[in-house]
Amino acid sequence: MGQDKPASVRPASSVTSWDREADVVVVGYGAAGACAAIEASAAGLSVLVLERTSGGGGTSALSTGQLYLGGGTAIQKACGFEDSAEEMFRYLSAASGPGQDDEKIRLYCDNSVEHFDWLVAHGVPFKESYYGEGSYTPTDDCLSYSGSELASPYRDIAKPAPRGHTVQQDGIEAGGALMRALVAAVEATEADVLADALCETLVQDESGRVVGVVARVDQEEQAIRAHRAVILTAGGFILNKDMVARYAPLLAKCAYPAASVGDDGRGIRMGMGAGADAIRMNVGCVVLPFTVPKKLMHGIFVNRQGQRFINEDQYQTVVGEAALEHQDGRVWLILDSETYCKPFAPLRDDEPVVGETAEELERNLGMPEGSLQHTLAYFNEHAERGEDPLFHKAENYLKPLVPPYAALDYSTKNALYTVFTLGGLRTNTRAEVLDPDGEPIPGLYAAGRTTSGLAAQGYSSGLSLADGTFFGRRAGQAAKRA
Ligand SMILES: Cc1cc2nc3c(=O)[nH]c(=O)nc-3n(C[C@H](O)[C@H](O)[C@H](O)COP(=O)(O)OP(=O)(O)OC[C@H]3O[C@@H](n4cnc5c(N)ncnc54)[C@H](O)[C@@H]3O)c2cc1C
């Protein structure tokens, strides 16, 4: 059977004996799984975490360790920024759609300060410092604008506040520091961890309740009983070529999967096998790295027709999504001699296409006659007055572009489009996995990239670790009532 189909379930009646048991079985030991285990254990439940690799970490440990948190966290306050759950909700609701789950976003915003405090109480280090604008924090600083809060239209929808909270680095990348803290917090509980345990299928009883999993441990199949809940926190599916081809073929054009070995979609397929709905499976976080150095943001992105399609001060994943999904991944960044520089993330062909005039550049790029000339003339005329009537790019990034010109090829063939999947199992605010009728599948919970989370489409940096840790906790808490 292809690797894109629901994984078959094992009927409980066929399990003659169980090799292990726990109240709660957590499948996958990344950030979401660790948080689920901590909360389930705190609720007095016995917990067994199953991890296919040799220890905790997953993609979370490879990440740059930024979490989207706000509403007035201690760091925001210490750095002098005002924020509220309401402003955060307005931003996220507008920036994370269409199709965003407002109920989840509302719950997350209302509890974001508590979630920040919980992370700190469990040893996750954050420095009381503000880095500035931009999703990536190369220093050990914490706070930054990590989405499109300052860009149109969002700056008019919600009062901007920096909400990217990067875990303090300590000789290792911030994602490693996050997982080091969470693994230590799990180890401080009664939870058991079984490494090198590859989960393959769920066990379901006649009533449809999920009662365990089947895992391959030391090359042997083991049946593991979950008395209350199985929590799927096994990452996304960007490394599963069959699933990407079936559900998200556009994402296959991106050169660099942001992933670790577990992102093969097994967790999602296990859930689907038990009757779960999988939603927004076409959506990915598509990072187009053009914002470092910031100088580049003064340029304008154009498509094959020489036309602009977005304000270039939006978060780089929003630009990436727009370029990939609406411009066939074929776009150029037009710069002049003052704004041109080599981007931080390498392009395969670093040599720009140049032109002494707009007309020459247009010809060298093979664009329709007059198209790019018109775009530049129109852009310059308004930029001169600090205006951008088409897309309302912020004034501080507006300046007329004067000849000679250079164009950097940001097509999918040439630029490092980085991607991970955002689609997955449909869950509710209690992290219960839902069937296509919206009914919870008894005994089954999920969080992190095994699910569709806070960002339905538009992504702001830090949302993946944010919803993974938060709804991982919700799953662990809900298991008590299961
Ligand atoms: C370079 C890079 C930078 C990033 N930066 C950020 C950032 O700053 N902020 C942000 O929010 N996101 C970031 N991301 C994305 C983010 O890291 C992931 O989306 C997030 O960590 C997913 O967390 P998770 O807990 O769902 O999955 P993971 O952390 O991947 O954990 C899943 C675990 O499940 C295990 N597993 C998988 N299948 C099975 C199975 N069948 N049986 C048993 N175990 C299994 C895996 O081995 C893994 O340990 C970044 C990603 C990369 C690669």
Image: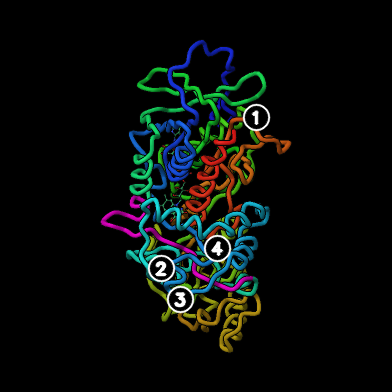
Give the left or right position of residue 51, taking residue 111 as reference. left
Relative to 286, residue 36 above or below: above
- The front one of 129 and 301 is 129
Q: Earlier in the sequence, mark 3 or mark 2?
A: 3
Residue type highlighted by circle 3: Gly
- Circle 4 sits on which residue? 319
Report the disc number at residue 80. Answer: 3
Residue type highlighted by circle 2: Val
- The front one of 318 and 401 is 318
Q: Earlier in the sequence, mark 2 or mark 1?
A: 1
Are the residues at dot 4 and dot 2 in contact (C-beta closer than 8 Å)?
Answer: no
Residue at horizontal 56%, vertical 19%? 10
Q: Residues within 10 Å of mark 4 (few under 14, many from 20)?
A: many
- The front one of 460 and 393 is 460
Residue type highlighted by circle 1: Gly
Which type of secondary structure does the marked residue at label 2 adopt? loop
- Circle 1 sits on which residue? 275
